[in-house]
Image (cartoon, rainbow, N blue to C red):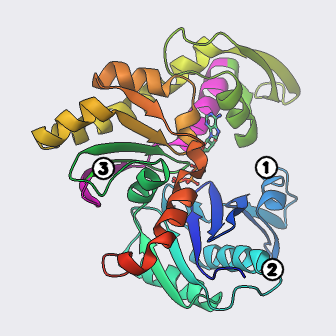
Amino acid sequence: MFSRDIGIDLGTANVLIHVKGKGIVLDEPSVVAMDRNTGKVLEVGEEARRMVGRTPGNIEAIRPLKDGVIADFDVTEAMLKYFINKINVKGFMSKPRMLICCPTNITKVEQKAIKEAAEKSGGKKIYLEEEPKVAAIGAGMEIFQPSGNMVVDIGGGTTDVAVLSMGDIVTAESIKMAGDKFDEEILQYVKRKYKLLIGERTAEDIKINVATVFPGARKEEIDIRGRDMVSGLPRTITIHSDEVEEALREPISLIVQSAKSVLEKTPPELSADIIDRGVILTGGGALLHGVDQLLAEELKVPVLLAEEPMNCVAKGTGLMLDNIDKLERSIV
Ligand SMILES: Nc1ncnc2c1ncn2[C@@H]1O[C@H](COP(=O)(O)OP(=O)(O)OP(=O)(O)O)[C@@H](O)[C@H]1O
């Protein structure tokens, strides 16, 4: 018999759904393709992502969550319902309880709206939880002990830095600098340096395949294609790791600064624990080459990359659902 509780990581870049007793059952990009004229949803998730930058005039591929906030609420609601229905085609979950992790900076009105959307998708009771806390739990940190744990969660839209103790956030910061902005910086760099226009997907390929943020730590190169800004014709160039390191130097320094400022506000006893336990990196952006090395050098504490960093929040919702009856009192 299947359990009825589900956990949802409603991310800027990806949505993951964890069903109690089954694990992660859905992992899809947060993209919706719509017909501009009729407002009809055409595709959701991976199929819609393939269309980004390749749609004809009447079709639009939308990312409804941007910069860690909900940019288009109706589309977010449609996407959430689509994914919940997708995992529940056989109707095995009637009236599940849902634990949803959504961007940190959303307003009370948006929180209420997400709850309503989840209720309309069949949820019996909806809980919302803060992302860094769930990411830390999913990364295996013992956050319920009276000791300091620090997590840096680098997603698509936001980076959340938090120090947790006894199950709660002690100090935290959330900045709108994460994976999407890295792509944008790479795109702008190629435009400036080579007068070549490239798409978001190409910029992401560069980031994943050749980028590093630790000077000299990676020596790769990749051929990329785009449109020459002068001739208007397609052109291929080769881009090297060192160039991408230069392009990402400023954006990554904002993440380093944010982590430093959280450490500066952390009570000394907890700081001492962080020296012993290290900082844990979660989120897809944590996979960016050299982030762990750079943070370790700058913060002067050990920095460890979580196992499967992109799944930490979804795994964390699963662990929280195991204790949901105990947690009911403490979460919204
Ligand atoms: N190997 C990699 N190297 C660098 N970046 C990567 C890698 N793999 C994935 N990413 C980036 O991780 C980001 C997505 O991470 P994740 O799924 O954790 O975000 P999210 O939870 O949807 O976002 P948010 O937490 O901001 O709402 C994307 O920007 C993606 O390009």
Q: Does the magenta-highlighted stretch encompass residue 185?
A: yes
Mark 3 neighbour density, 10 Å: few (under 14) some (14–19) many (20 or more): some
> Could you tell me if the residues under marks 1 and 2 are in contact, i.e. CB atoms within 8 Å?
no
Q: What amino acid is found at the position of numbered circle 1 in the picture?
A: Gly
Task: Name the residue tied to disc 2.
Answer: 40
Q: What amino acid is found at the position of numbered circle 3 in the picture?
A: Glu
Q: Measuring 62% from the left and 73% from the top, which residue is drawn there? A: 76
Task: Name the residue tied to disc 3.
Answer: 173
State the SS at label 1.
Answer: loop
Residue 227: image x %, image y %?
81, 31
Mark 1 neighbour density, 10 Å: few (under 14) some (14–19) many (20 or more): few
Query: In front of the other: label 3 or label 1?
Result: 3
Residue 101: image x %, image y %?
49, 66
**Rendered image: mark on residue 53:** 1
Q: What amino acid is found at the position of numbered circle 2 in the picture?
A: Lys
Compared with 282, 9 (above or below) is below
